Amino acid sequence: MSIWSRIANVFRADRLRSEIDEELASHLSEAVEMGQTPSDARKALGSVLRHREASRDIRVLGWLDSLRADVIFGWRQLRKNKVSSAAAVLSLALAIGSCTAALWLIDALLLRPLPVTNPEQLYVVKRQSIGDDGKPQVGESCSYPLFRMMQASVQGQAQFLAISYAERADPTYDSGQETEKAYRQYVSGGIFESFGLRPAAGRLLTEADDLTPGAHPYAVISHDYWTRRFGQDLSVVGRTFRMGLNLYEIIGIVGKGFTGTEPGTIIDVFVPAMMKGQVIHQPYSWWLRAFVRVPPGLTAQAIRDRLDTPFRAFQDERTKTLTGISEERRMQVLREKVVLVSAASGMSGMQKNYRLALSSF
Amino acid sequence: MPKPDSLQGSLDLLVLKLLSRRPRLHGYAMMSAIKDWSGDVLRAEEGTLYPALHRMEEAGWIRAEWITKETGRRARVYTLTAAGKKRFSVEEARWEAVTAAVNQVLRTV
């Protein structure tokens, strides 16, 4: 009897029981056919229940017994060839471990949606072009003026959100001359409301905090940073710190879970895009990603089509400034076009760098 | 007159012997055969025979299959496997050794 039918026996106790019953019933009929009276035959057979239990025990115990034998045999084989066994165990452990780690990373980096409301509505505007080497390339950076032009073209239809690349910053707190490091993102004031995020304490940035350049020195810190840096001290709301040329006030802590839009980097401090400084006026300063929330009822394609006109106008201006470039390069710039790419799982350089490596697992 | 439990641990051997001569026997046929061939001396009880059959099946000495008889009734019949044939010679040799030893004791003492 094969190992599979033994295992099947254990899991098919009902079938086993009815098989034993049928065999005993067949025995009775046989006895009667041979001339015994039914009652004599039944008396001779005795308790069906007892037979059934005895046989069932044998089959299942038999299975356990052979399992035990298999385990002992396996163990002895392993001990016999210690080196190759150790190598096999080790390589299996490593393989299982690395697969688990890779899947965990793939999930964390590439699959897990951002902890925001309707993450599937989130897209990032990318620029598709042909590179110097003739291969297609995609850039996801955007300048603030270009962001505003595109935002204006879909005004009232889809929400545009500017979110800077994560970068290291050096905040200093009142007493401190010590240098500290923190990850910072400049964001459109509206992201927290758009993402459906709630404050753990204080309040979050709003669109009203992102209107005039340099006029909104307010910061929201992440729950993670609040825990790590301040031990969840509630009095941190209202505290000020210096970062760059500005003195910021911490106005609130964003609820647990949201750590920015770049999987792989935990953002500590969110400040309004308007605090970015002079670069917000520079059309060719590529420091942010343009996120779009495509509302239900509209397709990403429809939004993309509307972005063509402002983008073309922007590119026309851009080629004028690109003096002294070859005609070929000029055409390359003019052939650039915008595409919308899903950002349901966020958007980060790490995703780009590791996507291929992780997928190869 | 057949006596209950008169097999004294030789049931496996008898079943293996029976099946080596006549494959595809069902439980009742084995009981009748043991009774007939032993001249009514030995008797396999149902309560011992079926668990023994299932145990030997589990051990891989015999193989069971369901057949449908001419009467239309299903019966579970058993056949010796290769492992069972080997087992049979082991059991037979053991039995010879034991009975020879017992006989020797009986004659000597």
Image: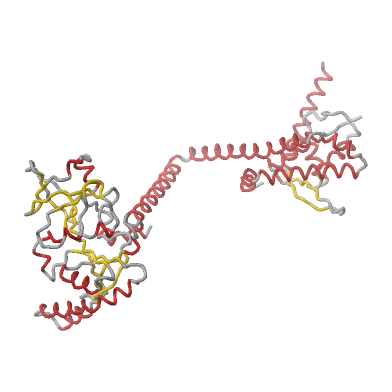
Q: Nearer the viewer, residue A179 or A93?
A: A179
Question: From what the image shows, is residue A211 above or below residue A239?
Answer: below
Question: From what the image shows, is residue A98 above or below residue A129?
Answer: above
Residue A290 pos. (x, y %): 23, 66
Classify the position of the C terminus of chain B by image quarter.
top right
Q: Residue at x 73, y 38 (%)?
A: A52
Which residue is most to the top? B109
The quarter of the picture where residue A22 lies is top right
Classify the position of the N terminus of chain B by image quarter.
top right
Q: Residue at x 11, y 51 (%)?
A: A248
Residue A265 pos. (x, y %): 24, 53
The scheme the figure's colours follow is: secondary structure
Question: From what the image shows, is residue B10 above or below residue A347?
Answer: above
Q: Is residue A92 left or right of residue A210?
A: right
Residue A355 pos. (x, y %): 32, 61
Q: Is residue A93 left or right of residue A170?
A: right
Q: Is residue A226 left or right of residue B72?
A: left
Q: Nearer the viewer, residue A257 or A336?
A: A257
Residue A74 pos. (x, y %): 53, 40
Q: Nearer the viewer, residue A108 or B20?
A: A108
Q: Nearer the viewer, residue A170 or A308?
A: A308
Q: Residue at x 12, y 65 (%)?
A: A280
